[in-house]
Structures are given as structure tokens and as C-alpha cells.
Image (cartoon, helix red, strand yellow):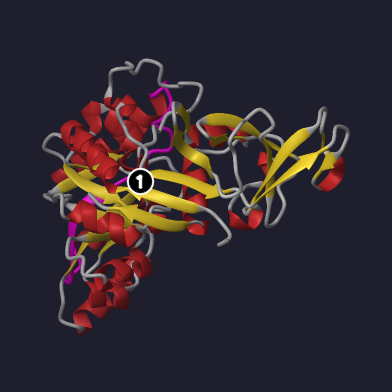
Amino acid sequence: MQRGLVAEIDHSCLLHNLSIVKTLAGSSRIIAVVKANAYGHGAVEVSKSLAQNAVDMLAVAYCSEAAQLRESGIKVPILSLFDPDPEEVLRHNVTPVLSNLKQALHLNKVASKANRKIIAHVKVDTGMGRTGFQMEDYKDMLSVFALSHIEVEAVMSHFSEADLADKDYAYYQVGQLVTLKRRLSQEGIYVRLWHISNSAAIISMPEVRLDAVRPGLMLYGCSPFDKNNQCDHISPKTPQNQLRPVMSVGTNILQIRRVKAGRYISYGRTFKTKRDSLIAVLPVGYADGINRLFSNNLEVLVLGRRVPLIGRVCMDTTMIDISDLEGVTEGSEVVILGSQGKENITALELASRINTIPYEILTTFGSHARKVSHLS
């Protein structure tokens, strides 16, 4: 038996979610975020599907990710959010995001030597506190617009908390961007594109979609709002509730064992059988992306029913209690993320069990699992 998880990637669900984005975006351009291997879904395959269905641009974190897409034959514009490496930008025709004057000057120097003009986006830190020109760096920003071999196509920023019901800080960030736009226009500088909206803002802040939007999580079928429904003003009929998860993750039972009552399961004696039990061993553990915090804290699907994970997650194996099921055999399918029968386990449910976010669940499984793509 091959160890580990299998992640099935359904591209028909991806394109369904893209259609929702297009409906919400209206006339705004779509910059589809495919960084971190498309949130674990497989960047090349996902990007090809998106490119074939009229997204305006793809966004990655680093130029190495852009290089992989270019080498696979993808031609659409690619935005590198954090890494404006000049050699990679020129070699792979990447659109860099510039966050400070030092980056811009270096890029301009290399572009000048190559006799090339580079289209770039300028990042402004309106309150995220991560990267970008700060508002007091206004003179530095003006210097970028004056560079001979850089053409600023867009100005962008990043929300800190657009997924909260309280939008005061998000609107403060928008206000910072609007102020900058007004100041630049007073200098006679007019930028074609402005963008800040992520998935949460696309759904809940229609008035700030601006010239382009950057959908990420919602493309992969997950709501950007947490289990506490922090955006409870969003109607159940809104598009976030029509999203279809793109990834499902599962494995198969390695071994079935009959265990007497009163026996301990796994390391540390954290689980003791209360009855004669039927225990299934799965060929996956924390080395395969099953977080150790799921120990005694997870349900999986077998034959369309929920069964508990018992004991501590091991490096290579995990145990589940199938005592209440009939017809389970070695090799039976186990679903960890996704649907089986009438039951469904979401990334949000998994995230809430270990106090994290769906992004981490998807990228973790995606980085460990063997992927099988179902192309539309």
C-alpha cells in the first residue's frame, strides 16, 4: 500500500467558484491568487484552468512560482507579490510588486541595462504592517513613478481584517488608499488600476472592489468567514454559501484489529477502550499532514458515517474506532476532508478543531498529499 493521503482536485468546482467571482466582480479585473501551489491544489493545473477561463492575471508569492507557471506554457500576466527579482522578472516576463524605493531603483537599473521597460504594481501599506510603502514614504513613491524603465500599472494594498463584521479598520485602509489616489492626481499622476479586495471584501464590501479584485480562498471553495459567522450580516443566499470545495482528501484502511475493553491505544495512553472494539489503522500520520493536535480530536468518514480518531496521531499511522460500523474491510475508503454519502467535513471544521484557519488546512494537506486532478 502506498503511504499517505490522496487529494482529489475537482476543476469543475474551481470553475464554478470562478463564475461566482466573475458575477461579483462585475467590470473589475480578476487577479486569481495561485500562490503556495494554488493553496495546495496544484498551481500548474489550477492556473491552466483559470487561464483558459479568462482571468486577467495570476498572482504568486515569489518569482520561482511564476517561473514554474511560465515553464508549463502559461502566457497570461503573472504578478509576483513579494519578490521583484530583476533577473527572474525579465526572464519570465513577470509583473513585480514594488514595496520600497530600493527595490525599484535596483529593478530600474537592471531593466535599463537590458533596454527593457517593466510593468509593475506599487504596494502601499495602509495598515497591514507587512510590506509596502508607508504613507509617509510619499516622496519615495513619487520617485518610483519617475523612473525611466518602470511603468506603474497599478497601486495596491492588502486588508488586515476584511473578514470581520466590524469593518471600521477595513474602511480606514480604503480611506488611506483613496487619499493617496487624490494626492497623486494632484501631481498629475494617474494610475490605471487600483486594487485591495481579497475574497472577504469581494463578498462583503462590494463598494471597494475598485478596478481589480484578488480572489484566493473563495476560488478553492472555502468561505473567508470563520465558524463564529463574524460576518453574520451576510445572507445565507449570498455567493459565499454557493461555493464548492475543490479539494477532498482521503486514504484507505491499512489494517483492522479487534481490541478488548480496557486496552490503551497509541502513545501516552490518552485513549482507553471502554468496550471490545474494532480499531482501524490508517497509513497516515503527522509526517503526512495529519496534525498531532487532531489526537482524540477528529472525526473521519467511513461508509458515509462519522467515526472518531482515537489516541495520539503517530508519525506514520493513525487509529480510528469503527466498532459501530458493519461491512468495513481493509482497504475501505476513509475521507478526512470532503463528502461521503450524506456527511461532509469541511476545511473550516478541521481548522476550528485545532484553532487555525482553512488556509493552513488546505496548504498542509496539499503539500503532503498525492494529488489527482479531475479536469473539467
* Three-letter residue code for mark 1: Met
Q: Can residue 332 be seen in this view?
A: yes
322 or 239, which lies in front?
322
Would residue 108 appear left or right of 258 to someone viewing this image? left
Q: Where is residue 93 in the image (x, y as percent from the top left)?
A: 21, 70
Would residue 123 appear left or right of 306 to someone viewing this image? left
Disc 1 marks which residue?
135
Q: What stretch is highlighted in magenta?
A: 146-167
Residue lying furthest front: 327
Q: Where is residue 67 in the image (x, y as percent from the top left)?
A: 31, 71
Is 92 a magenta residue?
no
88 or 1, which lies in front?
1
Q: In this view, does 90 lie above or below 2?
A: below
Would residue 158 appear left or right of 282 to someone viewing this image? left
- Residue 100 figure quarter: bottom left
Q: Is mark 1 on a helix, strand or loop?
A: helix
Q: What residue is at 35 percent from the left and 37 percent from the top?
A: 221
Q: Where is residue 19 in the image (x, y as percent from the top left)?
A: 19, 37
